[in-house]
Image (tube, rainbow, N blue to C red):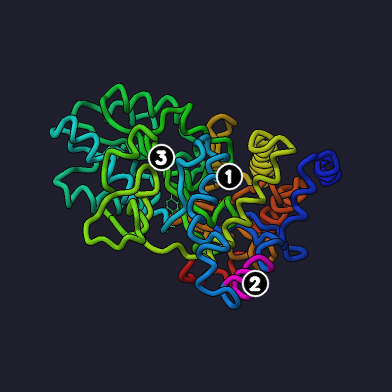
Amino acid sequence: MTRDEALALDAADALAPLRERFELPPGLIYLDGNSLGVLPKATAARVQQVVRDEWGHDLIRSWNSAGWIDLPQRIGDKIARLVGAGAGELVVADSTSVNLFKVLSAALAIARADDAQRRVIVSERSNFPTDLYIAESLAAQQGCTLRLADTPEQIPALLGSDTAVLMLTQVNYRTGRLHDMAALSRAAHEAGALAVWDLAHSAGALPVDLARDGADMAVGCGYKYLNGGPGAPAFVWVHPRHADRFWQPLAGWMGHAAPFEFTPGYRPAPGIARYLCGTPPVLSMAALECGVDTLLAAEPFGGMAALRAKSLALTRLFADEVSTRCPELALVSPTDDARRGSQVCFAHAELGYPVVQALIARGVIGDFRAPDVLRFGFTPLYTRFVDAFDAAVHLQQVLDSGEWRRPEFNRRHAVT
Ligand SMILES: *Cc1c(COP(=O)(O)O)cnc(C)c1O
């Protein structure tokens, strides 16, 4: 492909106007929206309004007058539209890690209420570490064990009559591989287990259909493809057939049936509201709502299906260009569109970290995931075809020039 051909793809792109909704620093090629989404233009003014007017002027009255108390449900209903959940089935709360603890506890309790001999949580070794740590901790508390697949193909064979829960991240954070949610949820159910899905790299990145694909519970991240800002609150969904079956373990007052009756005993709220724990972080919620709105703005243009088509075209372009230009890098992400999320990763045994640092110095932002992965996320709301093309050229230049050898690119920062 030539640069002019990439520019022609942008000129023909019906989604291109959505980029105007973001504050993108000039000259920057940002391929890290899978780690921290770009700031929407609406966010600063909206947060300022919440601070100045709702907090500064209206103070405590804003819990009612500005609807602060309903934020977890209001934003939850918007996210539900992106992930195939119904209104009233999903809430925004806490972090992905904390929400995973809640749903995994519930899933274990529900599966084991039917059959106490089920003691195994199945996941994969390459799952995101926090997911494995939460599962490990919960398993230790409940006398259960964690069984890890070394490859995605192994997963069905690890499910059996001892399995309580299959817990997977739909798109692998390091390889970008996309699981078949429908097939794996079915396999879990056939074994008598529940299917818990982490949508950290799929909500807002590709069409997700939790109800159609048989998920029992799901969690997801607010600061990646939902553009909610650093540390944005996360979300949690529980299928309505399970939502009332269990007190999630963090039984806080916001999940109580009547928090303002101030009664000493816990009575869980009906449905998903019981998965709330404490007071919602209103400023962060305001920012998250602006981020989610940037995705809903794509609905007139074909919504998540249109975003997915563009994402696949972007990742295909970048994978092809880099594979041709940089033969020393090994493509880690699947070439099959049906198996790839919205990121492209390459491996190199020694120079992954300094190459990413040299790219960042050139204004091309990706990230490095130990031990050897160079990771590039593509956000079709704001990433252009010419960005994908130029990033591949920069990567080739960094490798060919050897500039990654410079000492400043070889010093490790705390966050990679
Ligand atoms: C980013 C990510 C998380 C983040 O969890 P936090 O609690 O927000 O730190 C969790 N799981 C997966 C799979 C992720 O990619």
Classify mark 3 as within 8 Å of ligand 1 or not, answering yes or no.
no
Residue 331: percent from left, percent from top: 56, 42
Q: Is residue 84 left or right of residue 29?
A: left
Residue 296 on the magenta segment: no
- The image's mark for residue 48 is 2
Residues at badges 1 and 3 in contact (C-beta under 8 Å)?
A: no
The kind of secondary structure element at disc 1 is loop
Picture residue at 36% right of the left edge, 50% below the top: 275
Picture residue at 16% right of the left edge, 47% below the top: 142
- The image's mark for residue 214 is none
Total marks placed: 3
The stretch in magenta equals 45-54
Residue 78: percent from left, percent from top: 57, 45
Which amino acid type is marked by label 1?
Gly
In this orientation, which residue lies closer to the viewer: 330 or 180?
180
Q: Earlier in the sequence, mark 2 or mark 3?
A: 2
- To which residue does mark 1 refer? 204
Classify mark 2 as within 8 Å of ligand 1 or not, answering yes or no.
no
Q: CA distance from mark 1 to mark 3?
A: 15 Å
Pointer 2 local density, CA inside 10 Å: few below 14, some 14–19, many at least 20: some
- To which residue does mark 3 refer? 197
Q: CA distance from mark 2 to mark 1?
A: 25 Å
Q: Quadrant of the N terminus?
A: top right
- Give the number of the mark in front: 2 or 1: 2
